[in-house]
Amino acid sequence: IPIKQIKLHKLEMRLNDPFTTSFGTFQDKEFFITEAIDDDGNRGFGESVAFSSPWYSEETVQTSLHVIEDFLIKILQENEISHPDDVSGLFSSIRRNNMAKAALEGAIWDLYAKRKKIPLAQALGGTKKEIDVGISIGIQPTVKDLLHTIDHYVQEGYKRIKIKIKPDRDIDVLREVRAHYPDLPIMADANSAYTLNDMHHLQQLDELDLMMIEQPLEHDDIVDHAKLQAALKTPICLDESIHSLADTKKAIQLGSCKIINIKIGRVGGLTEAKRIHDFCKEQGITVWCGGMLEAGVGRAHNIALTTLPQFILPGDTAGSSRYWERDIIQPEVIVENGLIKVPDRPGIGYEIDDVALEKYTVAVKTFDF
Ligand code: OSB
Ligand code: MG
């Protein structure tokens, strides 16, 4: 893949609504759009998912810029890449910094698919023509607000919701939601808000018929999660704890979870995401695609990945209007009846809206090859 230039577009966007997790509230997003350009003028796009502060993982917008411009770009300049699967091997000389790696690898995957004139989904081996999606709802000020918000999204056609929980905003809240929606598929995500001391408390989840509870315990734990899973009927899904195929194998072997949330950025790119998918398929472990409140480019990558067969549960990648007043892609992502139609055009399948891109851009850095 003859890369001629890489551009890093730094963007600032504001979510339509603040998003609250067990860690705090978040509305303003800064991130990078990565662009890889070849000799023929094809443009491949990726998106970095690190946040401004390291609450979700240790990476930040600043650290990913440092790692990309001081290390990863050099590796790309000094090596030939015949297939995007080569990139993760080349990047393995740099420890972790998975979100930085994924941001560059994503642009190369898109460029590769565009050069081949095939959809990214097809380049990854995916076959679904439409994908099921749900919606992740942040912690709301009151239960009444939460029910109102759920109502709104159910009206819009979403068929599965994920509710953020934390101590004191968990069992009682979920009980009320369940009472209002006896048949709605519900997930709960704790973002590491509990410890094993909460085991008896968390056992009350079992009466609520949840699809799963996501990352109840520490972000870097797989041992206590195994103890908790043994005491719970509700499946545990790991998010923060899984950074690689190796982590996946260990967690499954220990019985730390029954479900894996795959996020492209957290695991270092599409190639590693695909490896985790393939292993889980072999082992009969259910996976689904999580989200990082991405703009359109990142969500287009999530959509392409979700076309692989073991993405059994609906993902968190909702429609553009759930996040942004104006997205950076055309057409915007539309959700109808809880489904997204997978685009069939080359690469990520959505055009970059250059006017919108420019509107949100605060800085651009260019690296020539
Ligand atoms: O834990 O899955 C998470 C958003 C930001 C950081 C972490 C998480 C989330 C979400 C929202 O749950 C997913 C989305 O809508 O993109
Ligand atoms: Mg999560």
Image: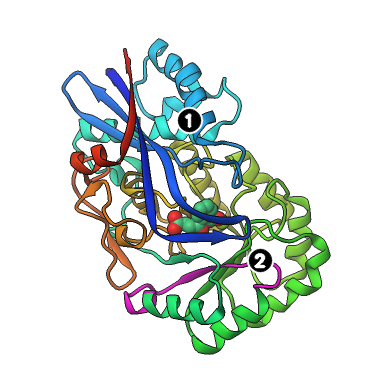
The residue tagged 1 is 101
Check residue 166 in the rendering and tell me which mark sits there, or answer none.
2
Image point (39%, 55%), residue name: 15
- Asked if the magenta segment contains residue 161, the reply would be yes
Residue 364 as seen in the image, left or right of residue 17: left
Other residues around mark 2 within 10 Å, as few (<14) / some (14–19) / many (≥20): some
Q: Alpha-carbon distance for marks 2 and 1?
A: 31 Å
The amino acid type, in three-letter code, at marker 2 is Lys
The reply to whether residue 6 is in sight is yes
Span shown in magenta: 153-169
Residue 365: in magenta span: no
Residue 250: image location, x then y, percent: 69, 45
Q: Kindly indicate the quadrant of the structure image that contains residue 48.
A: top left
> Which label belongs to residue 40?
none
Rendered residue at 16%/22% (across/down)? 40
Could you tell me residue 254's position as x and y percent?
74, 52
The count of marks equals 2
Q: Position of residue 224 (x, y in %)?
A: 78, 55
Tell me how the rendering is colored: rainbow
Is residue 311 visible from the viewing direction of this image?
Answer: no
